[in-house]
Amino acid sequence: MASSTFADRSDIGRARKTFGNHSIAAVLPFVNGGVSGMVAFTIIQPVDMIKVRMQLVGKCAATSTKPSPFALVKDLASQGRLLELYSGLSAGLLRQAVYATARLGIFDNFMKTLQKRADERKSAVTFLQRAGAGLTSGALAAFLANPADLALVRMQSDGMKPVAQRQNYKSVFDAFGSILRSDGIVSLWAGCAPTIARAMALNLGQLALFSETKARLKKHTAWSIQTQTVTASALACLFASTIALPFDLVKTRLQRGARTADGALVYRSMVDCFRKIAKEEGLTRFYRGFGIFYLRTGPHAMLTLILADYFGWLTGSKPA
């Protein structure tokens, strides 16, 4: 009886250990994704700040119509406000904690499932399957992270307003409180449609195309893992930036929440924003500032993907 009980306890112990290992394995892609995104954003935050202000030029008071990134930085430096390049850092980190964690974690789990099915059928994961995984993970993550994304835009654009109109947000939670008091909880998802469209476009390139390109490089080249990762991420980000920039511009305009003199929102929806920008500023406005957008998106995505790959190898959640 005693030996039987001991055996039962041993089986239970092994089962608990196995369950614990599976749980850790399931959680690691999410943790790796979140940490990678947060580290990458901390490095690239000043560029993101400049990108947002470039997109709002002409729509905020006391700004010239066509400043360059260098002019914006010079202007901040002349006023002793260079630290504003890190305005909204808390919101950016919170966004990455939600967005990068969700999108990379969900995508990684999708890909593991697809790879398992492909192995069972003795076939390969197709690009369409990778694209579907990227689009779905991007859409879900963007919806979850929209409140933090909204707070980030509000905090980054606050310094462009006349001094008397600035909110001077102390943190992302202060921004949440201000938004909730003035506009209600539903407003936290303002600009959600272009945010999701932007995320789907970026994920199509950054995850699906990255994954496909890396798989092809691994198959057809003798390059090192590091070279394959850097090359695949650079190509994927160029493609992703090209299709995502118009949605990013519309997202920023909607999330700023600008109003007319009578209190009505300047842009009522994503379609209305696209229409008004095209009519009032021209179609080329959608791609003005592509360089700064790629400089923000490319290195950030490359850092995130490279770090996620490295952390995955380090923690054993991905093969080397």
Image (cartoon, rainbow, N blue to C red):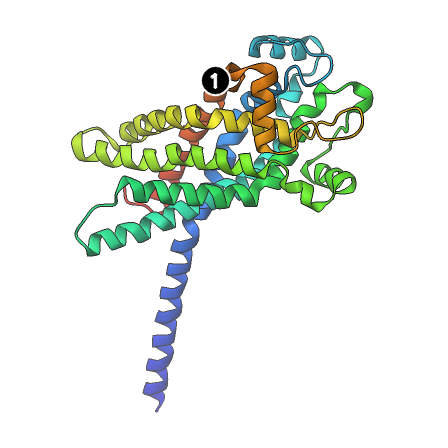
Foreground pick, 217 / 62: 62
Amino acid type shown at disc 1: Phe
The residue positioned 70% from the left and 46% from the top of the image is: 185
Would you call the spot at circle 1 few (<14 residues within 10 Å), some (14-19), or many (20 or more)? some
- Quadrant containing the C terminus is top left
Compare residues 142 and 101 and report the one nearer the observer: 142
Helix, strand or loop for disc 1: helix
Q: Is residue 176 left or right of residue 277?
A: right
Q: Quadrant of residue 95?
A: top right
Is 65 located above or below residue 144 in the figure? above
Image quarter where the N terminus lies is bottom left
Residue 49 shows in the view: no
Residue 145 against residue 76 in the figure, above or below: below
The residue furthest bottom is 1
Residue lying at 17% horizontally and 31% vertically, measured from the top left? 220
Task: Identify the residue position indicated by label 1 in the image.
Answer: 290
Q: Position of residue 85 (x, y in %)?
A: 62, 21
Give the tally of numbered discs. Answer: 1
Q: For residue 41, say whether it is visible.
A: yes
Direction from residue 101 to residue 250 in the image, left or right? right
**Quadrant housing residue 305:** top left
Name the spot of residue 205 as percent of width and height, x first: 38, 32
The percent position of residue 154, horizontal first and vertical second, equals 67, 30
Residue at image location 50% in from the left, 25% down from the top:
246
Residue 130 vertical position relative to residue 64 in the rendered view, above or below: below
Estimate the x, y position of residue 306 in percent, counting from the top left: 38, 33
